[in-house]
Image (spheres, grey):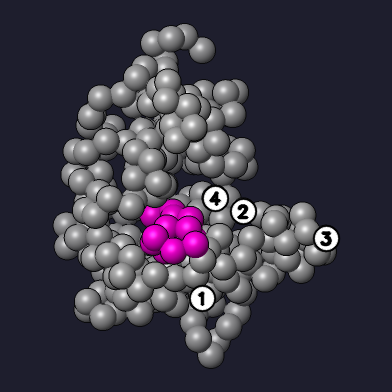
Amino acid sequence: MTQSALKESAPMSLPHPSFKRVLLKMSGEVLMGPNEFGIDSTTVKRVAKDIKQVIDRGVEVCVVVGAGNIFRGVSGAAEGMDRTQADYMGMLGIIINALALQNALEQIEVETRVMSAIPMSAICEPYIRRKAMRHMEKGRVVIFAAGTGNPYFTTDTAAALRASEMNCSAMLKGTKVDGVYSADPQKDKTAKRFDKLTYMDVLTKDLKVMDATAISLARENRIPIVVFNVREEGNFARVIDGTGTFTVVSDK
């Protein structure tokens, strides 16, 4: 990989400034806000408003959220739990976060559907691809819950899978930093931020954008990954507009 492929970033335009449909991937930690655990209602409401700003631009939005604010299957397994059982517990945590986000969106009059990979007919719809696409065509936000429905797969992989199935124009990875860095910028002040990376850059340099399975899925389906700071109010819409600060991972 040449130095020109990894440049320190300046604000840039997206390769596709006009999106029809995007998937927003957030970790569960985003919903914690300033807390150390659980769901912060103020933060969830702010995230909902950010999503509404994008919907109001005529962009179809689907969402995948993690459960790190409630329970991580990997962490449970590390503490001696059966990994399969721990992962299923994590999927239930995702359902909780999805319902919280749905509630916040509906309070600001955004039609929303939660679709779960694990059937839970009393509280949400089962995931059916054609039905999910129809919801988005009607302007509804679709929140995909319970990951892929299978243990040993991360929510990164679930996000890449759903983005592929939904024919999304891009997958937006909302994090606590404003892009992809050469190292953890909170620990290494010399870390450089990149404006553009290829999928292979991410895999060969192990840059921790998403897990390898998710990157491979995005690469195979040519879905650009846009990494941005979701904790900054209004940033989701700014990225959709092609402004602000972010990193684009694509095949170019």
Q: Is residue 145 visible?
A: no
- Say which label, 4 or 3, has the lower sequence index: 3
Image quadrant where residue 111 sits: bottom left
Total number of numbered labels?
Answer: 4
The residue stretch that appears in magenta: 24-36
Label 3 neighbour load within 10 Å: few <14, some 14-19, many 20+ = few
Q: The residue under label 3 is which amino acid type?
A: Gly
Give the quadrant of the C terminus. top left
Q: Residue at x 73, y 66 (%)?
A: 86
Specify the label residue 96 is tagged with. Answer: 1
From mark 4 to mark 3, how far is it between C-alphas?
24 Å
Query: Is residue 51 highlighted in magenta?
Result: no
Residue 83 percent coordinates (x, y): 78, 60
Front of the two marks 1 and 2: 1
- Say which label, 1 or 4, has the lower sequence index: 1
List the residue tagged with mark 2.
Answer: 154
CB atoms of marks 2 and 4 within 8 Å:
yes
Residue 199 percent coordinates (x, y): 50, 29
From mark 2 to mark 4, how far is it between C-alphas?
5 Å
Q: Element under label 1?
A: helix
Query: Is residue 26 highlighted in magenta?
Result: yes
Image quadrant where residue 51 sits: bottom left
List the residue tagged with mark 3.
Answer: 80
Q: The residue under label 1 is which amino acid type?
A: Ile
Q: Element under label 3?
A: loop
Residue 164 percent coordinates (x, y): 48, 50
Label 1 neighbour load within 10 Å: few <14, some 14-19, many 20+ = some
Q: The residue under label 4 is which amino acid type?
A: Asp
CB atoms of marks 2 and 3 within 8 Å:
no
Q: Element under label 2?
A: loop
Specify the label residue 199 is tagged with. Answer: none
